[in-house]
């Protein structure tokens, strides 16, 4: 089966193809193709020097016998939620695991016409509007989703997600799984990594998330108002701290280099970010010119003390206090706000182990992972270590193109290898021993092929102290010939790997709409949702069908109060005048779980849903006279089709 045949229609019609393992030639093709791509950017010699034979483990591809073991029978519930970013779709998705069932798509930075996100007044107010009432942005690029913590594990309160395009952070309430706040970060571009803190660095009583840290990849003029455009040396990058409750920006810290992914310590003291551009370069050859980049650590308590002491400045119109975290301003470790730990050039993801001891920084262009010990970074900040590099306790060669690492809570790490199209399992203690010179330490335990080119990978509960070592998900960047062809744009593939044993086993696979980045896998008992809203949570609620009416508030401003109660809309018809600015307020009075109603107005571009006991509103100009049947779009009742009302727009 070569891949040319796969595009042949007859091949698609052969059911015996189902489950056929991919031959290794196919993988080699992908591997070398990806390498050719990188060779064009003067790859470091380190890449070629990585020998897979050093693992002593053979690839464990082809464990198809494991497929089906984790099938979830009809009507049975999954054990885990997976909250995943949607990438440049701008949304967040919820999947059930191990089944891979899609449970929900939550619009965040995008516009979505089923829910009415970007259409209703309430959602527009969250997204932000321009003077003309249109949403400020209707594009977004979500990468990283992380939940709030209490005592080192998820507390089911909020999820946070970034928008890389416009530099915004959004919060989702976990009880309703909807976005409730969006904040735009000042003076940054390329907001990528995001991570909530896990406890307060100073106040021991605060053992839950109160801050969210945001990295920024791109350097821009400070402020970015047309100055310094042709002088990249004057560009800067800021690390941002946002208040988890108010969603206001608390402070920013100027750094040398840039920031990619973000991790936070379990003791609340440090946040860190891998840096692939310590060169502060504006072109990629500049960004790759240094042999070493860094993982920068932020001393949260010191930064906040410096701000309290007035050692901050502001940039442009922003009122946010900024501190200087650059090396030149932080010569003495004992007072330094930041610590730059050198790592091999152009690293990617950084993840902390569930015991809180180590940060694993993946090599990307280097075939290594760098293990940095948390306690040693604190020692450096205390002035007890000379060289930031002395915080590195291991740097094993693990394979080509390492990107992201998950942990099983049993001392093993699982890293995605983009170029090798593999997941590698390696042992932290063995890596540390090997780094100290122990030649017998067996660092790499196993490898498994994935299809193809994994980006993110993460383990069940792996970003909490409750890491349970059951599953690893590989979010693959290319699906190639893996699925029925659907045209040039391919879906992506997520693969479920059983990590309970010594060897990893491929246990399942599901498609995802482009393009998931990071995700978290949360045990289902850690998630508490509500099925019905509280009527009183909505100041505009129309609490009784008898309150349905049309109200003219002087001039041409008209408000229409409506209720939905299967199978009727509170008014059979309502009349407005051409030229009116009409606001429709709609409350779903049904109290029955799963009884959602929709509301669409033909030719007026209005469509949204109201869930049980929820109220939403829309505002539009009645600029077209005539009869418009407002109808329920969401199947709710045997008389769903009859559930409508007439909007009469008089000339
Ligand atoms: S970063 S591969 Cu956000 Cu890896 Cu996506
Ligand atoms: Cu109400 Cu369909
Ligand atoms: Ca670099």
Image (cartoon, grey):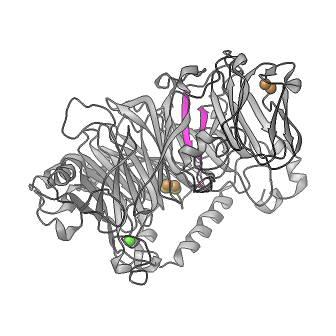
| Residue found farthest to the front | 554
- Please tell me how many numbered marks the rendered image carries: 0
Is residue 83 within the magenta segment?
yes
Is residue 405 within the magenta segment?
no
- Front-most of 24 and 400? 400
Q: Is residue 24 left or right of residue 438?
A: right
- Front-most of 440 and 123? 123
Q: In the figure, residue 83 lies in which quadrant?
A: top right
Q: Is residue 110 left or right of residue 396?
A: right
Dominant secondary structure (helix, strand or loop) of the stretch shown in magenta: strand
Whether residue 545 is situated above or below residue 156 in the rendered picture? above
Q: In the figure, residue 607 lies in which quadrant?
A: top right
Q: Residue at x 49, y 31 (%)?
A: 522
Percent x, y for residue 390?
Answer: 19, 59
Query: In this orientation, does residue 107 appear?
Result: no
Query: In this orientation, does residue 2 appear?
Result: yes
Q: In the figure, residue 276 lies in which quadrant?
A: bottom left
Range of magenta residues: 79-96
Percent x, y for residue 346?
Answer: 40, 67
Percent x, y for residue 629?
Answer: 87, 35
Q: Residue at x 66, y 17 (%)?
A: 593
Whether residue 235 is situated above or below residue 7 in the rendered picture? below
Q: Is residue 280 left or right of residue 617?
A: left
Q: Residue at x 22, y 41 (%)?
A: 201
Percent x, y for residue 150?
Answer: 34, 29
Whether residue 527 is situated above or below residue 242 in the rendered picture? above
- Front-most of 42 and 144? 144
The quadrant of the rendering that contains the N terminus is: bottom right
Whether residue 266 is situated above or below residue 536 in the rendered picture? below
């Amino acid at each position: 089966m070569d891949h040319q045949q796969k595009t042949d229609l007859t091949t698609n019609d052969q059911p015996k193809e189902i489950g056929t393992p991919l031959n290794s030639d196919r993988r080699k093709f992908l591997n070398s193709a990806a390498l050719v791509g990188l060779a064009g950017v003067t790859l470091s010699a380190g890449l070629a020097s990585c020998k897979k034979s050093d693992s002593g483990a053979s690839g464990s591809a082809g464990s198809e016998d494991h497929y089906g073991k984790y099938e979830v029978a009809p009507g049975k519930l999954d054990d885990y939620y997976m909250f995943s970013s949607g990438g440049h779709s701008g949304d967040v998705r919820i999947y059930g695991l191990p089944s891979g069932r899609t449970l929900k798509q939550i619009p965040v930075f995008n516009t979505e016409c089923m829910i009415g996100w970007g259409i209703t007044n309430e959602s527009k107010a969250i997204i932000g509007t321009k003077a003309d009432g249109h949403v400020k942005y209707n594009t977004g690029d979500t990468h990283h989703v992380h939940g709030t913590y209490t005592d080192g594990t998820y507390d089911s309160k909020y999820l946070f997600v970034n928008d890389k395009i416009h530099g915004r952070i959004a919060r989702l309430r976990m009880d309703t799984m909807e976005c409730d706040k969006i904040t735009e970060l000042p003076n940054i571009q390329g907001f990528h990594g995001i991570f909530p803190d896990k406890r307060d660095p100073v106040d021991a009583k605060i053992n839950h998330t109160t801050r969210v840290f945001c990295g920024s990849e791109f350097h821009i003029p400070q402020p970015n108002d047309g100055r310094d455009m042709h002088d990249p040396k004057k560009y800067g990058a800021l690390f941002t701290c946002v208040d988890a409750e108010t969603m206001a920006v608390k402070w920013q810290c100027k750094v040398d280099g840039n920031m990619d992914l973000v991790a936070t310590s379990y003791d609340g003291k440090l946040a860190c970010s891998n840096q692939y551009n310590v060169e502060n370069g504006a072109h990629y050859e500049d960004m790759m010119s240094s042999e070493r980049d860094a993982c920068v650590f932020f001393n949260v308590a010191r930064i906040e003390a410096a701000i309290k002491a007035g050692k901050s400045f502001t940039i442009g119109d922003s009122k946010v206090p900024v501190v200087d975290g650059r090396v030149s301003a932080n010569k003495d470790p004992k007072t330094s706000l930041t610590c730059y730990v050198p790592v091999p050039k152009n690293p990617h993801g950084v993840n902390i182990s569930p015991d809180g001891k180590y940060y694993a920084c993946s090599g990307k262009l280097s075939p290594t992972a760098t293990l940095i010990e948390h306690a040693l970074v604190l020692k450096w900040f205390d002035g007890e270590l000379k060289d930031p590099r002395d915080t590195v306790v291991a740097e094993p060669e693990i394979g080509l193109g390492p990107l992201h690492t998950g942990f099983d809570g049993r001392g093993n790490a699982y890293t995605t290898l983009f170029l090798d199209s593999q997941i590698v399992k390696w042992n932290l203690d063995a890596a540390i021993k090997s780094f100290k010179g122990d030649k017998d330490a067996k660092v790499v335990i196993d490898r498994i092929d994935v299809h193809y080119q994994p980006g993110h990978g993460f383990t069940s509960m792996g970003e909490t102290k409750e890491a349970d070592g059951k599953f690893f998900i590989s979010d693959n960047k290319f699906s190639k010939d893996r699925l029925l062809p659907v045209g040039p744009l391919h879906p992506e593939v997520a693969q479920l790997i059983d990590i309970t044993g010594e060897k990893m086993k491929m246990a399942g696979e599901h498609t995802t709409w482009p393009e998931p980045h990071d995700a978290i896998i949360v045990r289902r008992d850690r998630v508490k949702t509500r099925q019905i809203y509280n009527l009183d949570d909505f100041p505009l609620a129309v609490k009784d069908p008898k309150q349905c009416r049309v109200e003219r508030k002087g001039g041409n401003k008209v408000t229409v109060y409506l209720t939905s109660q299967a199978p009727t809309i509170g008014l059979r018809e309502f009349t407005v005048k051409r030229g009116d600015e009409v606001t429709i307020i709609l409350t779903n009075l049904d109290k029955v779980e799963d009884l959602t109603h929709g509301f669409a107005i033909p030719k007026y571009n209005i469509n949204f849903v109201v869930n049980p006991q929820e109220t939403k509103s829309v505002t539009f100009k009645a600029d077209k006279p005539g009869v418009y049947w407002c109808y329920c779009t969401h199947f709710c009742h045997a008389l769903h089709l009859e559930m409508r009302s007439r909007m009469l727009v008089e000339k």
